[in-house]
């Protein structure tokens, strides 16, 4: 029979009476707040103008924060079996309007989504034509690798983030691609309530979001450490009223939405080499690294370091 271990109780006020650790809340970077607000804005104000503004910001943040060289987002039009352009990057690294282009949903697109279901969050192809939009003309500016990262919501595919290095012809960076996959996963979840008017700018305006949802999302963007009880107190309602209203209006829970915001902030804080995992997780609002690890693994199916740094795709010729 095992002898039960006796644990020593430590009182830091006795052990270190003059060196008690001080709470130090780090002001989030503008980039971290941008990622968090993307996750929150669509939930708080789901309308066509918001969608378009958010998609442009995602394209630009994918370049400025994740450091993808050129990016573009296409949305899936399942009814017409087409991929519809939104915003992209030209041959000079500038953001360009690509709303007037589309292409037929084909074999490669189906393969990208099928591989995502098998656990491969992005797929890279070699020897692809690399294109740019010049006004009403589409030009090929070279050949090289192109990566396709699916944007998938809880009820299925929403679109795809494409990226390449047509300007510098640099090799693919798998750590950056992993971060892009995290961003696309967060975006897919955020776009879910917008499905009915995702592709139709002339669609009727959706029902206005409940004021409690708008205020709760705003408060959580500012402070993702808030508990449901603390959030309810600030809003002047009971925790039960808040949780029920939030769930009814958004089809997600306050806790799940808070975790999405924390993951988004983490993505904006973690450095390129992922050498600051603990710091980035705590600054994102997680109470401990263990909590962050648990939430990340539940969301992405892998430990964060494994997912962001060490993932290797080796299942076929299309893998890089």
Image (cartoon, rainbow, N blue to C red):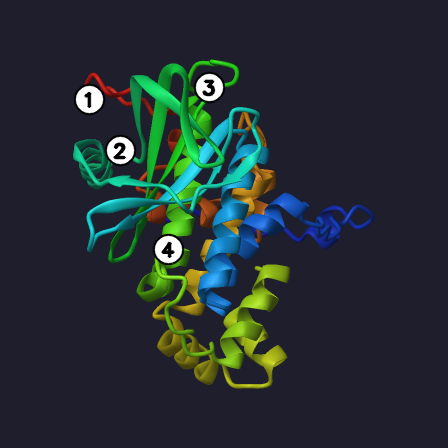
Residue at 50%, 74% in the rendered image: 213
Q: CA distance from mark 3 to mark 4?
A: 30 Å
Specify few, some or many for label 4: CA neighbours under 10 Å numbering under 14, 14-19, or 20 or more.
many
Residue at 73%, 54% in the rendered image: 13
Q: CA distance from mark 4 to mark 1?
A: 27 Å
Relative to 229, does residue 50 appear above or below in the rendering? above
Q: Secondary structure at mark 4?
A: helix
Q: Position of residue 209 (x, y in %)?
A: 47, 76
Residue at 46%, 19% in the rendered image: 166
Q: Which mark is residue 315?
A: 1
Which is nearer the N-term, disc 2 or disc 4? 2
Specify few, some or many for label 2: CA neighbours under 10 Å numbering under 14, 14-19, or 20 or more.
some
Q: CA distance from mark 1 to mark 3?
A: 25 Å
Q: Position of residue 127 (x, y in %)?
A: 30, 14
Q: Quadrant of residue 231?
A: bottom right
**Which residue corresponds to mark 4?**
189
Which is nearer the N-term, disc 1 or disc 3? 3
Q: Secondary structure at mark 2?
A: loop
Q: Which mark is residue 166?
A: 3
Quadrant containing the N terminus is: top left
Which is nearer the N-term, disc 2 or disc 1? 2
Residue at 59%, 34% in the rendered image: 64
Specify few, some or many for label 1: CA neighbours under 10 Å numbering under 14, 14-19, or 20 or more.
few
Which is nearer the N-term, disc 4 or disc 1? 4
Discs 3/2, front: 3
Q: Which mark is residue 120?
A: 2
Task: Say if mark 4 contacts mark 1, CB within 8 Å.
Answer: no
Q: Quadrant of residue 254?
A: bottom left
């Amino acid at each position: 029979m095992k002898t039960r271990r006796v644990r020593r109780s430590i009182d830091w006020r006795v052990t270190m009476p003059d060196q008690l650790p001080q709470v130090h809340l780090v002001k989030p970077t503008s980039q971290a707040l941008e990622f968090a607000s993307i996750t929150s804005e669509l939930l708080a104000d789901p309308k066509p103008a918001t969608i378009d503004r958010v998609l442009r910001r995602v394209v630009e943040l994918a370049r400025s924060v994740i450091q993808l060289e050129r990016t573009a987002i296409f949305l899936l039009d399942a009814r017409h079996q087409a991929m519809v352009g939104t915003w992209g990057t030209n041959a000079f690294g500038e953001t360009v309007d690509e709303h007037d282009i589309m292409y037929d949903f084909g074999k490669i697109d189906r393969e990208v989504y099928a591989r995502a279901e098998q656990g491969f969050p992005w797929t890279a192809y070699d020897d692809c034509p690399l294109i740019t939009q010049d006004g009403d003309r589409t030009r090929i500016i070279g050949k090289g690798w192109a990566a396709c990262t699916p944007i998938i919501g809880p009820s299925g595919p929403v679109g795809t983030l494409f990226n390449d290095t047509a300007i510098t012809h640099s090799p693919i960076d798998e750590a950056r691609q992993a971060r892009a996959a995290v961003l696309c996963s967060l975006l897919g979840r955020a776009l879910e309530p917008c499905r009915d008017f995702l592709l139709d700018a002339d669609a009727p305006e959706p029902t206005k979001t409940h004021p409690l949802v708008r205020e709760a999302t705003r408060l959580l963007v500012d402070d993702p450490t808030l508990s449901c009880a603390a959030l309810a107190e600030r809003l002047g309602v009971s925790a039960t009223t808040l949780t029920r209203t939030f769930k009814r209006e958004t089809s997600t829970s306050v806790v799940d939405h808070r975790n999405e915001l924390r993951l988004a902030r983490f993505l904006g804080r973690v450095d390129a080499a992922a050498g600051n995992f603990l710091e980035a997780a705590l600054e994102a609002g997680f109470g401990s690294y263990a909590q962050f690890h648990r939430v990340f693994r539940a969301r992405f199916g892998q430990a964060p370091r494994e997912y962001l740094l060490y993932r290797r795709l080796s299942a076929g010729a299309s893998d890089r």
